[in-house]
Amino acid sequence: MESNWNGQIHRDLLKNFALTGAAGYIAPRHLKAIQDTGSQLVAALDKHDSVGILDSYFPACDFFTEYERFDRNLEKLRRENEGREVHFVSICAPNYLHDAHIRTALRVGADALCEKPLVLNPWNIEALQELEADTGQRVWTILQLRVHPALIALREKIQQESRQEKYELQLTYLTSRGQWYLRSWKGDEEKSGGLATNIGVHFFDMLTWLFGGVQRNEVHVSTPTTCAGYLELEKARVPWFLSIDINNIPSEFRSKGQRTYRSITLDGEEIEFSGGFTDLHTLVYQKTLAGEGFGIDEAKTAIQIVHDIRNTEPTGIHYNSHPILKEHKM
């Protein structure tokens, strides 16, 4: 089957989708991607019923607030075999439910297409690989930074260079959140995996995709609102800083009302990739439908990194700490 990256999908690739976490923040990107690829959403699940967004995309899809009824519906569609059987289950539910919802997808004869993080622990990955072998279905994940044109070009440049010394990187991601964050499942480490997992896993995947495997993984500070450390990769040294605390946003940006700040520098120069995010989920869906998506093997490294961060005792400020950490003397 052939896919066209301008959005044209071979007719045989058009599939039926179900979706969990329909009321969540990320769900609209999945709904748009399903629509953009010409596929259909036949069933959706969320324990909250504030899902009017469905009317903008798939008003006729079945909707459930109870997992058991959703599960029964998927099985019913499979057995009826009237053209509405589910081929993919898109998973946008809270992180701690990903593993269970993936298993549901495989059990009803569908592939799973799961948001980050795929699972919370490395041993969950091994179990899912066994289920793939048992069912013949696939587990896919959303690693949308791997399809960003600017980052693809950067990766090609790195691979072509015969550089001996390591690159010097600096990762800063500040995305301020209100009180709701810590009171929701996102603030519960057992459910979200903690801050580095919840807002950092995509960046860690991107870094290892660009610069190779992990040689050192240090954690310097870890609180419910801020996490910072140092990664040494095969081709790069990376002090990193993640935070949802608005006080960490540089004052010149905060004074303008800016609540998010993202910066990745390579040898002192900014990597510009702020544009081009609108259609990344659609690109991942296109690749997945063509059998070229990102599976369990691609997700492994980042899951291991954030698991290790979560289970490492912070050491405090080091010589290789991120500049913000040194400045604030956390």
Image: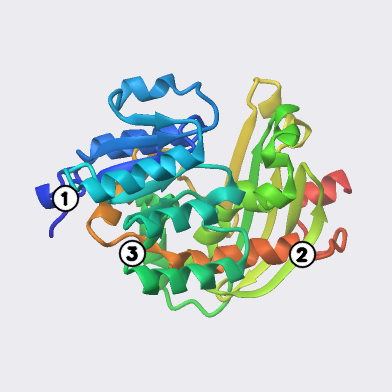
Q: Which of marks 2 and 3 is nearer the N terminus?
A: 3
Amino acid beneath label 3:
Gln
Residue drawn where x is 49% and y is 31% of the image: 65
> What residue appears at the point 88 percent right and 59 percent down from the top-left corner?
316
- Mark 1 touches mark 3? (CB < 8 Å): no
Label 3: which secondary element: loop
Kindly identify which residue carries mark 1.
4
Which corner quadrant of the image does residue 61 belong to? Answer: top left
**Spot occupied by residue 186 in the image (x, y as percentages of width and height):** 67, 41
Q: Which of the numbered marks, if any, corresponds to residue 206?
A: none
Cα–Cα gap, marks 2 and 3: 32 Å
The amino acid at mark 1 is Asn
Q: Earlier in the sequence, mark 1 or mark 3?
A: 1
Residue type marked 2: Asn
Which numbered disc, 2 or 3, marks the residue closer to the eye?
A: 3
Taking the spot 58% from the left edge, 43% from the top edge, the residue there is 94
